[in-house]
């Protein structure tokens, strides 16, 4: 499988080496020497067809992370293989969080590059097939019964959403990126009387500032340079239906004024137009920002905030609804299955599932979907194991005992789960607690986490306190032995305990304030 590969690297020697390797394997190489030039190839006036991007992380000007961020903002969904001479775990974590598909350390061997590219092309091909299958199926309205959740944390979201669907008031959906805010918005629309009407989405954070007004409200032909045709705008496009404004906190202040009028009066002024246009829409907004704080900082209009925040719904992050992970994993695995009916995954190992539940998922459901999708496409066997999630494993290893259960064990929670509607099949097995809910993975005693929930190295004071507690528990509160093993004096140990607000007379760690 070959394709057009974009190379983005400021090092001319490295560019030549990678280009030679790509040509050898039959790929077409497109070479650029900066992040800005690479973006122009992907999304400029002379953009070209690109299958995979090989991106250097460390470059002057727009660096690799900046390119990844810009690609995400512009919804450019092309697999990116990042490469850098600085191959530390922090670099890997940062790149993967910003959407990188794979990671290679310079100088990468031609075979390693070809493996990464082949995997990327394979995943892209399956993704394209999934889109075609989805288009062929078409139709149908998403409702709250279609939402895959068994978590109590989502009960309030569904309850509020069902009530909102029966009215026409403006809704503000809040939550971190990737938690499923658009899914909630679609469920509201699909459960109301506008279910058969248009549902129009706008990512306000992905539109250049100079085009926001035109895209939202439309423009007349010739109203500005480049306006060669009349454009109706998203408000008019959503007439009689629902308009979903995602990342509304990123709207420029001058556009916020016109948005306020559109919400209040139900009419818009196209750029260059001579008259207003009446619209009838259901407005649902979403943001990952703290809009109230933005109001205080002068970045968001207070009057618009109160117009939008009539009915707020907060969607909790995935780390607060880990019980949903087994069912989401199975659902994402099943999405891949129709693209290759000859090969169907039987499930996921209990060890791999425990690892996924131990991870905090800063990218939330979107990150989980991408991880499961990639693992499902590239898996060699019929069961997903922790080996199919190398980036997640690198961050979780040490906080959960990955060797506690055999890799071949099937996690019954996802093997038997019915994921559509309100019912879930009865499940038993190693991944279930006594009450029938997926068991939370427990850290193995004697291990310390080096990274926090965002993948950053933890503060030394936090690790020190955890080590002292562990030592007190391990040596049954024998403080002289604890001090000796920690390599500090007994008086130093007592002083540190006092600094952390711990009673040294309490003995074992389970009697310490934690």
Image (spheres, helix red, strand yellow):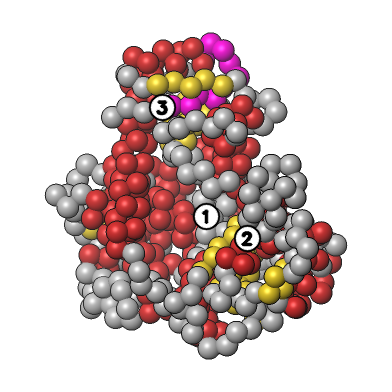
Q: CA distance from mark 3 to mark 2?
A: 35 Å
Please report the bounds of the magenta region as a residue range: 4-14
The local secondary structure at tag 2 comes to: loop
Task: Using the image, tell me which numbered label, if any, was put on residue 4.
Answer: 3
Camera-nearest residue between 414 and 410: 414
The answer to whether residue 370 is left or right of residue 431 is right
The answer to whether residue 58 is left or right of residue 337 is right
Whether residue 313 is visible here, answered yes or no, is no
- Does the magenta run of residues contain 11? yes
Residue under the image location 52 percent in, 59 percent down:
178
Residue under the image location 22 percent in, 65 percent down:
415
Q: Give the label, 3 or 2, closer to the camera.
A: 2
CB-based contact (under 8 Å), mark 3 and mark 2:
no
- Does the magenta run of residues contain 478? no
Across and down, in percent, residue 12 comes to: 56, 12
CB-based contact (under 8 Å), mark 2 and mark 1:
no
Q: Give the label, 3 or 1, closer to the camera.
A: 3
Across and down, in percent, residue 367 comes to: 46, 53
Across and down, in percent, residue 173 comes to: 60, 72
Task: Using the image, tell me which numbered label, if any, was put on residue 156.
Answer: none
The residue that label 2 is drawn on is 232
Across and down, in percent, residue 276 comes to: 74, 69
Camera-nearest residue between 224 and 459: 224
The answer to whether residue 72 is left or right of residue 460 is left
Indicate which disc, 3 or 2, sits on the residue closer to the N terminus.
3
Indicate which disc, 2 or 1, sits on the residue closer to the N terminus.
2
Q: CA distance from mark 3 to mark 1?
A: 29 Å
The residue that label 1 is drawn on is 363
CB-based contact (under 8 Å), mark 3 and mark 1:
no
């Amino acid at each position: 499988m070959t394709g057009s590969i974009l190379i983005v690297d400021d090092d001319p020697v490295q560019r030549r080496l990678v280009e030679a390797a790509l040509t050898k394997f039959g790929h077409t190489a497109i070479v650029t020497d900066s992040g800005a030039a690479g973006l122009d190839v992907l999304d400029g006036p002379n953009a070209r067809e690109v299958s995979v991007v090989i991106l250097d992380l460390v470059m002057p000007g727009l660096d690799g992370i900046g390119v990844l961020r810009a690609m995400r903002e512009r919804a450019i969904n092309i697999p990116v293989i990042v490469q850098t001479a600085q191959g530390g775990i922090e670099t890997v974590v940062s790149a993967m969080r910003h959407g990188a598909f794979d990671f290679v350390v310079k100088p990468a061997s031609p075979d390693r590059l070809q493996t990464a590219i082949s995997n990327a092309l394979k995943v892209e091909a399956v993704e394209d097939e999934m889109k075609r299958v989805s288009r062929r199926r078409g139709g149908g309205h998403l409702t709250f019964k279609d939402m895959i959740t068994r978590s109590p944390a989502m009960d309030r979201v569904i309850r509020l959403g069902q009530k909102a669907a029966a009215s026409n008031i403006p809704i503000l959906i809040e939550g971190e990126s990737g938690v499923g805010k658009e899914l909630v918005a679609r469920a509201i629309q699909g459960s109301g009387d506008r279910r058969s009407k248009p549902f129009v989405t706008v990512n306000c954070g992905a539109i250049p500032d100079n085009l926001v007004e035109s895209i939202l409200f439309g423009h007349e032909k010739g109203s500005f340079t480049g306006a060669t045709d009349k454009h109706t705008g998203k408000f008019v496009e959503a007439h009689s239906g629902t308009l979903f404004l995602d990342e509304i906190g990123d709207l420029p202040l001058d556009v916020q004024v016109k948005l306020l009028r559109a919400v209040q009066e139900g009419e818009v002024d196209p750029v260059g137009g001579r008259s207003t246009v009446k619209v009838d829409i259901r407005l649902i907004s979403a943001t990952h920002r703290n809009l109230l704080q933005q109001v205080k900082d002068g970045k968001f209009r207070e009057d618009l905030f109160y117009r939008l925040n009539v009915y707020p719904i907060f969607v909790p992050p995935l780390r607060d609804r880990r019980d949903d992970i087994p069912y989401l994993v199975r659902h994402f695995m099943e999405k891949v299955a129709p693209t290759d009916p000859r090969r169907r995954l039987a499930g996921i190992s209990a060890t791999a599932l425990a690892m996924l539940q131990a991870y905090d998922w800063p990218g939330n459901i979107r990150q989980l979907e991408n991880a499961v999708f990639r693992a499902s496409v590239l898996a060699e066997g019929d069961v997903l194991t922790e080996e199919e999630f190398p980036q997640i494993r690198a961050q979780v290893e040490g906080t959960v005992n990955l060797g506690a259960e055999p890799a071949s064990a099937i996690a019954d929670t996802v093997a038997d789960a019915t994921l559509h509607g309100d019912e879930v099949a009865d499940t038993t097995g190693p991944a279930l607690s006594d009450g029938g809910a997926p068991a939370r993975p427990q850290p193995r005693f004697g291990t310390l986490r080096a990274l926090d929930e965002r993948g950053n190295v933890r503060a030394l004071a936090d690790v020190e306190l955890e080590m002292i507690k562990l030592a007190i528990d391990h040596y049954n509160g024998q403080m002289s032995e604890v001090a000796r093993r920690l390599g500090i004096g007994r008086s130093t140990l007592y002083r540190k305990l006092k600094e952390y607000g711990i009673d040294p007379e309490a003995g074992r760690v389970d009697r310490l304030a934690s």
